Amino acid sequence: MDDLTPLRQLWLDRINTAADPAAIEEVRLAALGKKGEISLKMRELGKMTPEERQTTGRKLNELRDEIDAALRARKISLEDAALEARLAEEWLDVTLPGRPRPQGTIHPISQVTDEITAIFADMGFAVAEGPQVESDWYNFDALNIAPEHPARQEHDTFFMHRAEGDDRPPHVLRTHTSPVQIRAMQEQGAPIRVIAPGRVYRMDMDQTHTPMFHQIEGLAIGRDISMAQLKWTLEEFCRAFFEVDEVELRFRASHFPFTEPSAEVDIRCSWDGGQLKVGQGNSWLEILGSGMVHPKVLQAAGIDADEWQGFAFGLGIDRLAMLKYGIPDLRAFFESDLRWLRHYGFAAGDVPSLSGGLTA
Ligand code: DAH
């Protein structure tokens, strides 16, 4: 057989100019694969005389081994180069100082909403939602507040606009989170245990009122849920929320169209030195409205009032935030004053939980 030198040179050149592992594989197949040039040549050995076969066979074997070794070496060096390039590109200076804390903080309202949600979630309440632009029926009628009911006036409602000639009652900006009770019962039926945090709107503005504020609605419907369970739930909630061992609640008979009986709930506190302390002292502070869900409300939501009963409550998030964090003026919540926010704000990564601490 003729001189193998040109062949050798050809393949070694191809190997050395292969630019990446895929190209190497191509060269390998073209040379040493089943139908590769070297493999085919080896097959021709069979047609040779024994003497020829001995010399050419040896040379071909050597060539095959050499190409094989060159392929492997080139592959390794290509992989090494790729790794080097990657290491150079993904370079990281571990001696750099840590990144500064993000500028943004969590607003006290969001923080308190998360805290309250965590506490009720722990007691088995799921979160329900409803729209902020609500129909007159959900906001009032379904909650047993008839069109002529005085509560409609008390709610200082914002009405949405209706087109000229459209006589249907206008939608409203929901005046409370109670309509979510109806929506949740319609969607899920009974039994049910939900809370509904969200924005509510009333036309009112002074040191203790803003036109938009936040409530959390609670609803628990079962076959024999009672006022006693309402009391336990709220006491348990207050203990967890204010992070004190003892709280004392006072239930005052009250009236809401959607509950019967109804109670407003005050919490025992003291104002010594202008500092509010929950759980001790001689003052009482109203924190929420509550009661046993009125049968008409259950009916409006499609629930059989002979079979099901339960409690509901509605509490003001802004109020609770002021109480817990000693914020004297409600309006500060909405002024977007960054210095105020940084003073009261909470770190973005802190997620309130009962096991991990509400206010880590
Ligand atoms: N919706 C009432 C309000 O905004 C608060 C309230 C009172 C909610 C009693 C309730 C309840 O669920 O049972 O003034």
Image: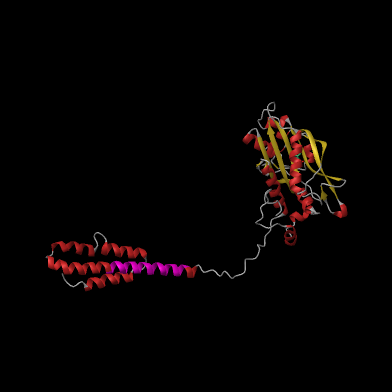
Residue 287 shown in magenta: no
The image quadrant where one finds ligand 1 is top right
Q: Can you give x and y, in whole percent of width and height, for residue 15 in the image?
A: 31, 69
Colouring chosen for the image of the structure: secondary structure
Given residues 94 and 210, the one toward you in this image is 94
Given residues 225 and 54, the one toward you in this image is 54
Residue 64, quarter of the rendered image: bottom left
Quadrant occupied by the C terminus: bottom right
The residue at the point 78 percent across, 37 percent down is 151
Whether residue 39 appears in this view of the structure is: yes
The residue at the point 72 percent across, 30 percent down is 296
- Give the overall secondary structure of the magenta segment: helix
Residue 69 shown in magenta: yes
Vertical placement of 163 versus 91: above or below?
above
Residue occupying the far left of the picture: 49
Residue 46, quarter of the rendered image: bottom left
Q: Is residue 153 left or right of residue 46?
A: right
Q: Can you give x and y, in whole percent of width and height, for residue 30 in the image?
A: 27, 63
Vertical placement of 245 versus 42: above or below?
above
The magenta segment:
66-86
Quadrant occupied by the N terminus: bottom left
Count of marks, rendered view: 0
Whether residue 211 appears in this view of the structure is: no
The residue at the point 70 percent across, 34 percent down is 142
Residue 29, quarter of the rendered image: bottom left
Q: Can you give x and y, in whole percent of width and height, for residue 63 in the image?
A: 24, 69
